[in-house]
Amino acid sequence: MTAFLGVESSLTGRRWVGPSIDIDRAAEALEQATTLPRAVCQLLARRGIGAQEAESFLAPALRDLLPDPRGLKDMEKAATRFLKAAKSGENIAVFADYDVDGGSSAALLLTWLRAMNRDATLYVPDRIDEGYGPNEEAMAQLASQHDLIVCVDCGTLSHDPIAAAKAADVVVLDHHLGGETLPDCHAVVNPNRQDETGDLAHLCAAAVVFLMLVEVNRQLREDGSQGPDLMAMLDLVALATVADVAPLIGVNRALVRQGLKVMARRDRPGIVALSDISRMDTAPNSYHLGFLLGPRVNAGGRIGKADLGARLLSTPDIHEAKAMAERLDQLNTERRDIEASVRAAALAQAEERGLDAPLVWAAGENWHPGVVGIVASRLKEATNRPAIVIGFDEDGIGKGSGRSVSGIDLGASIQRLASEGLLVKGGGHKMAAGLTVERDKLEPAMTRLSELLAQQGADRIGPSDLKLDGMLMPGAASIDLVNQLETAGPFGASAPAPRFAFPDVEIRFAKRIGDSHLKVTFGDGLNARLEAICFGAFDTDLGPALENHKGARFHLAGRLDINTWGGRQTVQLRLEDAAPAG
């Protein structure tokens, strides 16, 4: 396919790829059959949406897309046991992972129980002292004091820790890849069990918890009782789905759309406090969830008190929420400083090893385990390769995290390494995984992982292309158009935001902002102008070229959004790439 606008290598080194002839034809047919703008039709055509489906796609109804919870194995057993414990006043413990998905999952259960005038013990393991998932000591202690332990966003591979909890019933609500055998417990509900169909493999743990509560409420109705309002809890499911980078397809898309509406009502004290301290001044969208709220909720589990995020999301007290949000904001600032140091060292090490291998990896002494996942994500983004980053403690035990690229199943390969004895433990899902490795097995483990990833084609992935949905002129970029494009959202994993090229424009104004950002105003030579902001522009050749444009004309590419300032709304291009015109 010919490069879009002839851009074979942009200022960031990417090839521009536009819509195919088939997508262009489908978009034209959509435009003729509907009243939608061409830009929206281009986006729908890329998603494979025809004229008959367009209306329902742009306004998805959760009731039409929500699966029957009983379609998941063990769901009815899990819901029945949970409801029995809630009704009879049994002691319940919630064992949650320390990330956003785990915190949101725990908050769902705690919120539901509170509405039923019940409470539960929250237990979130310390990332450094205990590591990911249930451990034998914690589970045995919880079992000695509780009748039911619900493990959320963890537990599917925790055979020994769950066996240590023999004094209590254990229910697992998870989404991580399952092994050949399941732990011996009351129920394991997980769409990624090996004996599941995989139809719901895209659900995060919070969505699995939500489905269990749907089943619990159904059982209550069958007994003539009314359960808590689950729709009011969808803000938690939306936050977890986006922050865990679950694909925004099918029911996930509907859950996030409805969850954003719930969040906009500002009913949950924890999310309100976090939104305010993040300086969110517009209605929430998936960007806010993934880049403002999510990192702050995660900060407690990364470098602070592990249960802080779950407690924030579940508290009904606005004053307590404000205090916790302030602490999480401070921790997030500290996390960024730690991350920057580790990222620089990891990138230098990975570059020395080579960035074109099937696996890009780095390991260092005393690298904070709370940031290795973020740094792995940065390496993956910089190289378009699966990446692993590992931090070793004084005892020679390395705890690492990995991130993958589309089409490469990292979780399955990590599990294979664990089964072969090269890792102490490891697991995850296609796009993200965690591992523990002994220092003397580091090199053979990474060599073997590279081999497994190469078998999936990871060594044949080229630089990532910039995929564009079409062209726009500055005068066409209106607030109405941006709002109409948003109806095709939310945007995120497996549902990329629409990107457009603005061809042959002139730079009217360019100013450096801070150390690495650039603000630009551009026009088409007529009267229309558009403002743009480019974050990290000076990390590549993009910033210097546009700042010192000397009257040259450029093709610009990026995503449109609405900038709110002083009560006034304007369209802004979030500039991602550029190339000289002509």
Image (tube, helix red, strand yellow):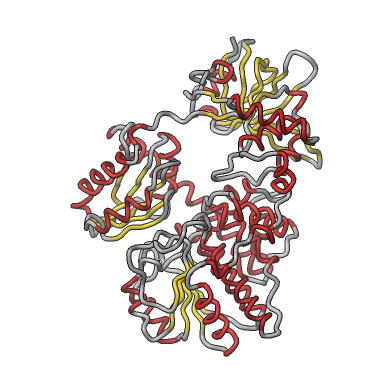
- Examine the image and state in which quarter residue 399 appears: bottom left
**Residue 65 lies in what quarter of the image?**
bottom right
Q: For the view shown, which residue lies furthest in the front direction?
A: 52
Give x and y (percent) for residue 25: 66, 27
The residue under the point 72% across, 18% down is: 523
The percent coordinates of residue 113 (x first, y second) are 61, 78
Q: Residue at x 55, y 30 (%)?
A: 467
Q: Residue furthest bottom?
A: 88
Image: 224 above or below 516: below
Q: Position of residue 340 (x, y in %)?
A: 44, 42
Report whether 515 appears left or right of 562. left
Q: Is residue 111 visible?
A: yes
Looking at the image, residue 262 sits to the left or right of residue 516; the answer is right
| Frontmost residue, 357 versus 1 | 1
Which quarter of the image is occupied by the C terminus? top right
**Where residue 253 sits in the image (x, y, percent)?**
63, 51
Viewer-proximal residue, 451 or 50? 50
Q: Looking at the image, is 417 positioned above or below residue 578?
A: below
Residue drawn 63% across and 48% down? 286
Give above or below for 65 relative to 144.
above
